[in-house]
């Protein structure tokens, strides 16, 4: 919470107050999707009230470990505040422990439950009630943990996360910090969510062991001003005790809410198995995405059973476009040569004082400032932001 307040205060210093209040309010996704009401899927923030310890702590993964003297922090957390001119080699590198106590709501019992850490810097291990449930290498992609069978109901539960941002050549950036041109921060520096849904659900690509698959995959083909094909692939898992027959339903809406496409694909999923739904939407006169007109459609995906009841679902925003580099003919966007120079910038995912633990609003603010300066390409500094 302190970091979010600090980020907002910094924003106030950079913008006149009336501009901050009157600014467009951006919409931020949760764990890569937008929650859809009455879909059977819920998203709960797990950001508040973690306890942090710098250094090793023997037994810190066990529920009965005494963490009362640890500092209380809220996510995103970058372990420490750093000077505004920090350029590397002065921030903390090494082991840290995070612990969170919580009692799950009774209404969640019987649901599939996943912890979704949007990122934990460096190496990490996630324990729930003393059980090691996940080990992850690399600080830029989500760590997703199935906690369904690890929770205790009606009592205190403990999530313990061990993380280490020490130099390690085995994953990006792969170099020692003293030879990098930026600070290699640490901690659980992005949001954490508890995702709850029914046992029949759209999978998470960061959890499933699916090559070039898992979750909802969207691609585009034959893109032009007159038409475009939206290619859809949805990976569905059935963790219930019964076989499932139903449909995957796709609804495409323009930004104003107007429905422009609706279709469904029949699926059958045996108990304990997965299946993949594949379909295609052909749009006439599509509203194509470009830097000048960055139109985003809403794609709503639902799973319905044979009785027509919604089992799972969520919303994604998609931009319909094609991107090609044609050698001496240059860069083509949406089937046409792009007529203006490609002007861009490099951007690291950090901010003064808070380091990598940057609020979503500051990420958005940086993107807007770069776009207002006329830049249309952002190089994301070797790592997914």
Image (spheres, rainbow, N blue to C red):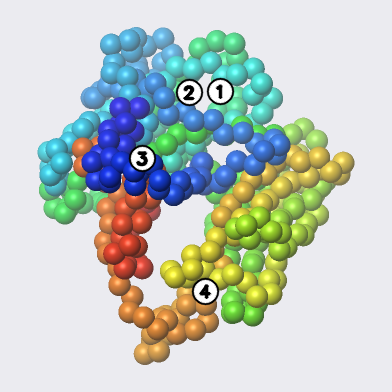
Q: Is residue 348 above or below residue 5?
A: below
Q: Are marks 2 and 1 in contact (CB under 8 Å)?
A: yes
Residue at mark 3:
359
Above or below, comparing residue 45 to residue 288 in the picture: above
Q: Residue 214: x, y in percent?
A: 59, 51
Among the two numbered marks 1 and 4 on one chain, the one whose residue lies closer to the N terminus? 1
- The residue sitting at 51% across, 41% down in the picture is 30
Q: How far across and how far down the image is residue 39, in percent? A: 70, 39
Residue tagged by mark 4? 322
Q: Are marks 4 and 3 in contact (CB under 8 Å)?
A: no
Gap between marks 4 and 3 measured at Cα: 31 Å
Looking at the image, residue 63 sits to the left or right of residue 373; the answer is right
The 10 Å Cα crowd at callout 1, few under 14, some 14 to 19, many 20 or more, is some
Tell which of 181 and 12 is nearer to you.
12
Q: CA distance from mark 2 to mark 1?
A: 6 Å
Q: What secondary structure is found at the residue carrying circle 1?
A: loop
Compare marks 1 and 3 and give the one earlier in the sequence. 1
Give me the residue at 44% from left, 23% from top.
159
Please tell me whether mark 3 sits on a helix, a strand or a loop.
loop
Could you say which disc has been placed on residue 150 in the image?
Answer: 1
Any mark on residue 128, and which?
2
- How far is mark 4 from mark 2, CA to CA? 43 Å
Q: Which mark is residue 374?
A: none
Residue 382 falls in image quadrant: bottom left
| Crowding at mark 4 (Cα within 10 Å: few <14, some 14-19, many 20+) | many
For the point 19% across and 50% down, the residue is: 182
What separation in Å lies between label 1 and label 3 (alpha carbons)?
A: 30 Å
Crowd band around label 2 with a 10 angstrom C-alpha radius: few (<14), some (14–19), many (20+): many
Q: Nearer the viewer, mark 4 or mark 2?
A: 4
Give the total of numbered labels.
4
Q: Position of residue 330 (x, y in %)?
A: 38, 85
Depth-wise, is mark 1 or mark 3 nearer the camera?
A: 3
């Amino acid at each position: 919470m302190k970091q979010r307040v600090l980020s907002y205060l910094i924003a106030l210093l950079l913008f006149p107050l009336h501009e901050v209040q009157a600014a467009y309010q951006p919409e931020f996704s949760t764990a890569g999707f937008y929650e859809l009401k009455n879909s059977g899927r819920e998203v709960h923030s797990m950001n508040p009230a973690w306890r942090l310890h710098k250094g090793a702590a023997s037994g810190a993964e066990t529920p009965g470990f005494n963490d009362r003297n640890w500092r209380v922090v809220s996510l995103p957390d970058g372990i420490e505040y750093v000077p505004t001119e920090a350029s590397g080699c002065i921030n903390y590198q090494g082991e840290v422990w995070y612990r969170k106590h919580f009692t799950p709501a009774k209404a969640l019992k019987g649901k599939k439950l996943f912890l979704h850490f949007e990122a934990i810097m460096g190496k990490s291990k996630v324990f729930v009630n003393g059980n090691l449930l996940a080990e992850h290498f690399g600080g830029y992609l989500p760590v997703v943990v199935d906690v369904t069978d690890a929770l205790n109901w009606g009592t205190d539960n403990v999530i313990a996360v061990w993380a280490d941002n020490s130099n390690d050549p085995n994953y990006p950036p792969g170099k020692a910090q003293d030879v990098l041109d930026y600070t290699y921060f640490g901690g659980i520096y992005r949001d954490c969510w508890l995702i709850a849904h029914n046992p029949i659900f759209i999978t998470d690509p960061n959890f499933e062991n699916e090559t070039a698959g898992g979750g909802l995959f969207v691609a585009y083909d034959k893109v032009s001003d007159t038409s475009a094909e939206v290619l859809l692939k949805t990976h569905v898992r059935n963790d219930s005790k019964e076989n499932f027959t139903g449909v995957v339903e796709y609804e495409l809406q323009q930004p104003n809410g107007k429905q422009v496409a609706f279709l469904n694909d029949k699926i059958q999923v045996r108990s304990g198995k997965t299946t993949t739904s594949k379909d295609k939407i052909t749009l006439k006169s599509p509203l194509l995405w470009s830097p000048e007109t960055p139109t985003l459609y809403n794609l709503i995906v639902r799973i319905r059973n044979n009785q027509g009841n919604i089992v799972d679902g969520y919303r994604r925003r998609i931009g319909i476009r094609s991107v090609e580099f044609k050698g001496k003919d240059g860069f083509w966007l949406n089937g046409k040569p792009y007529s203006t120079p490609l002007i861009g910038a490099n951007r690291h995912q950090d901010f003064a004082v808070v380091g990598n633990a940057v609020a979503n609003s500051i990420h958005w603010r940086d993107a807007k400032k770069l776009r207002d300066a006329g830049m249309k390409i952002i190089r994301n500094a070797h790592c997914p932001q």
